């Protein structure tokens, strides 16, 4: 284990982008500790990077990654038809609540109060501007980020599983620690039990559907209690496309029959016997009983990302903003 100025824990999009930006802005080696390089990105939790105007600079100039901004085009299935999401809400505003209610019930197992904001329902989004138009996203490949890190002379990737013991020694050995792992591990270490849990997200990944799925359509919401799955989306991992079907809770073998039924209704030409599927369990959604402010954490530790900041709404644009604040704080402390 190294011992230097900066350690980054976790190699998901938060850890990788922090490593890349910090390597630009600080001198010395950066040690990145994780059991993989890609995190949710590899498992399908992250489909495209939520875009803001300054982000293309980061992605293309800093990371020198091939990327493009594109409209994320979605759909929603209501009353046996597929409609554009979210534009069809102009016509049928009540569908926004329908999608939000279904999303909360299926992903979190809770009833929606409509006090919570929801990105899928622009009427309830936390935005002053009502956006009933497609979102913008940056499309890039996780392999671009992995390559950037592999080629960087000052970023050292250490593949390892971090436990309470190694966490303690990293916090002790490094001047700054950027922590992107699930917060419970740090909680255990400082003797604090965080009251939150993941509701497991199952992703059924199909290869055979990819040939018939229209490539311009990024996702379909299925806000119907008839189906356990809430969304089907196109997923590009490196050079190949797959179709991901998401449902939460326990693994249920009957879901793939329902997927066939749904696909047969809208894409009847598929040869279903050819389907090869993978079932993947990813961490999924955070279910918080109550939101707590984390108690005092070690002064050299910065929390970054959805699972460390314990906030299910953290997307890539928020992560990048936080990385900039961390850089500012490190500079202030005299690095
Ligand atoms: C279903 C879903 C869809 C989403 N869609 C989008 C989207 O379209 N756009 C968007 O911008 N955001 C989206 N998000 C949010 C986005 O996925 C996350 O905010 C982001 O990917 C989280 O990145 P991260 O680096 O914080 O965490 P992760 O990607 O989970 O990275 C954590 C890393 O730490 C490693 N790790 C964990 N524990 C240990 C340990 N003990 N020892 C060693 N290594 C460890 C993991 O292997 C991983 O590499 C979505 C989230 C979900 C759940």
Image (cartoon, helix red, strand yellow):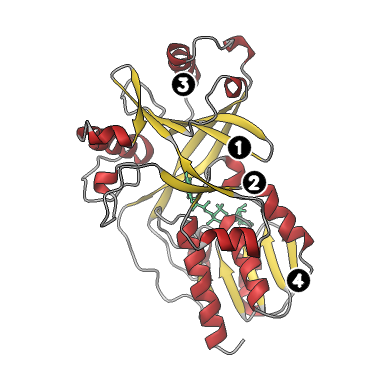
Q: Earlier in the sequence, mark 1 or mark 2?
A: 2
Q: Which residue is mark 4?
A: 154
**Residue position marked by numbered label 3 in the rendering:** 255
Q: Residue at x 42, y 34 (%)?
A: 74
Q: Residue 133: give x, y in percent of width and height.
A: 35, 42
Determine the image quadrant of residue 101: top left
Q: Nearer the viewer, mark 3 or mark 1?
A: 1
74 sits left or right of 330 in the view? left
Q: Is residue 188 left or right of residue 162?
A: left
Front residue of this view, candidates 280 and 131: 131
The residue lying at 66 percent from left, 73 percent from top is: 24
Please name the residue that numbered disc 2 is placed on.
141
From the top left corner, tell me how far across and down residue 300 is, in percent: 55, 79
Q: Quadrant of the C terminus?
A: bottom right
Q: Quadrant of residue 211?
A: top right
Contact between labelled residues 2 and 1, with CB atoms less than 8 Å apart: yes
Mark nearest the camera among 1 and 4 is 1
Q: Residue at x 53, y 46 (%)?
A: 48
Q: Residues within 10 Å of mark 1 (few under 14, many from 20)?
A: some
Q: CA distance from mark 3 to mark 4?
A: 46 Å
Q: Earlier in the sequence, mark 3 or mark 4?
A: 4
Residue 268 vs 46, above or below: the answer is: above
Q: Which mark is residue 236?
A: 1
């Amino acid at each position: 284990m190294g011992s230097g100025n900066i350690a980054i824990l976790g190699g998901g999009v938060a850890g990788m982008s922090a490593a890349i930006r910090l390597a630009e802005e600080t001198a010395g080696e950066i040690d990145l500790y994780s059991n993989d390089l890609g995190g949710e990105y590899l498992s399908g939790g992250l489909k495209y990077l939520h875009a803001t105007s300054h982000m293309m600079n980061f992605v293309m100039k800093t990371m020198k990654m091939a990327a493009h901004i594109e409209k994320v085009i979605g759909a929603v299935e209501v009353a046996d038809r597929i409609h554009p999401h979210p534009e069809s809400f102009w016509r049928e505003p009540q569908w926004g609540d329908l999608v939000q209610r279904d999303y909360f019930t299926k992903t979190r197992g809770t009833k929606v109060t409509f006090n919570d904001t929801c990105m899928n329902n622009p009427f309830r989004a936390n935005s002053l501007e009502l956006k009933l138009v497609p979102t913008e996203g940056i499309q890039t490949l996780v392999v671009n980020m992995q390559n950037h890190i592999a080629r960087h002379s000052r970023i050292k990737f250490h593949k390892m599983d971090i436990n309470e013991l190694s966490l303690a020694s990293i916090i002790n050995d490094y001047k700054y620690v950027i922590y992107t792992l699930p917060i419970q591990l740090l909680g255990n270490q400082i003797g604090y039990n965080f009251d939150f849990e993941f509701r497991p997200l199952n992703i059924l990944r199909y290869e055979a559907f990819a040939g018939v799925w229209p490539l311009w359509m990024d996702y379909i919401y299925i806000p119907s209690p008839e189906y356990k799955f809430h969304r089907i989306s196109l997923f590009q991992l490196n050079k190949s496309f797959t179709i991901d079907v998401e449902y939460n809770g326990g693994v249920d073998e009957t879901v793939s029959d329902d997927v066939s039924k749904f696909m047969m209704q809208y894409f009847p030409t598929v040869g279903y016997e050819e389907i090869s599927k993978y079932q993947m369990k990813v961490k999924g959604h955070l279910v918080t009983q109550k939101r707590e402010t984390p108690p005092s954490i070690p002064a050299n530790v910065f929390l970054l990302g959805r699972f460390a900041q314990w906030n299910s709404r953290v997307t890539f644009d928020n992560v990048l903003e936080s990385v900039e604040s961390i850089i500012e704080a490190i500079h202030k402390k005299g690095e």
